[in-house]
Amino acid sequence: QVQLVESGGGSVQAGGSLRLSCAASGYTYTSRCTAWFRQAPGKEREGVAAVGLGGALTHYVDSVKGRFTISRDNAKNTVHLQMNNLKPEDTAMYYCAADFARYCSGYDPSNFGYWGQGTQVTVSS
């Protein structure tokens, strides 16, 4: 049974930084795509960043480009999301998700078969 566990969330002031981590266990294969999603109260879940199998290919949505950096350490089965210059609109529950079948091709939640429980990020102005 694959398990994804997020950590690193918290409360910061605008302009601050947080580093989220997603630790995976329970499988012997490396996910072909791992992504971070977020969901704010009353809003739909949205993908914000994704990283491919080898870690070299990354994608960011426009709202986080230049501020967030996604990376993966396959030896440790961990994916990180470094978030800098945080804004109040970044406040949300953040989830990591893994797709073992497909290479990264967008943020359709139905493509990701495994999800973590989420970690809360709160940014105050």
Image: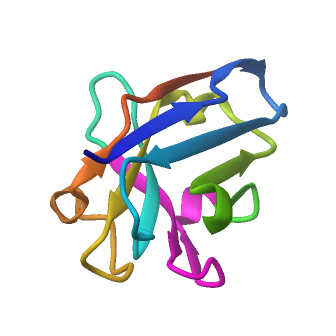
* Quadrant showing the C terminus: top right
Residue 56 on the magenta span: yes
**Image coords of residue 30 (percent x, y):** 45, 70
Left or right: 120 as drawn, with respect to 118: right
**Image coords of residue 82 (percent x, y):** 74, 49
Residue toward you, 86 or 112 = 112
Numbered label tally: 0
Q: Visible in this render: residue 5?
A: yes
Per the rendered image, the range of residues in magenta is 46-64
Residue 39 on the magenta span: no
Q: From what the image shows, is residue 82 above or below residue 9?
A: below
Tell me which residue sits at (60%, 53%) in the image: 78
Q: Visible in this render: residue 125?
A: no
Give the image quarter of residue 71. bottom right
Tell me which residue sits at (27%, 24%) in the image: 42
Q: From what the image shows, is residue 104 above or below residue 27?
A: below
Tell me which residue sits at (21%, 56%) in the image: 113
* Quadrant showing the N terminus: top left
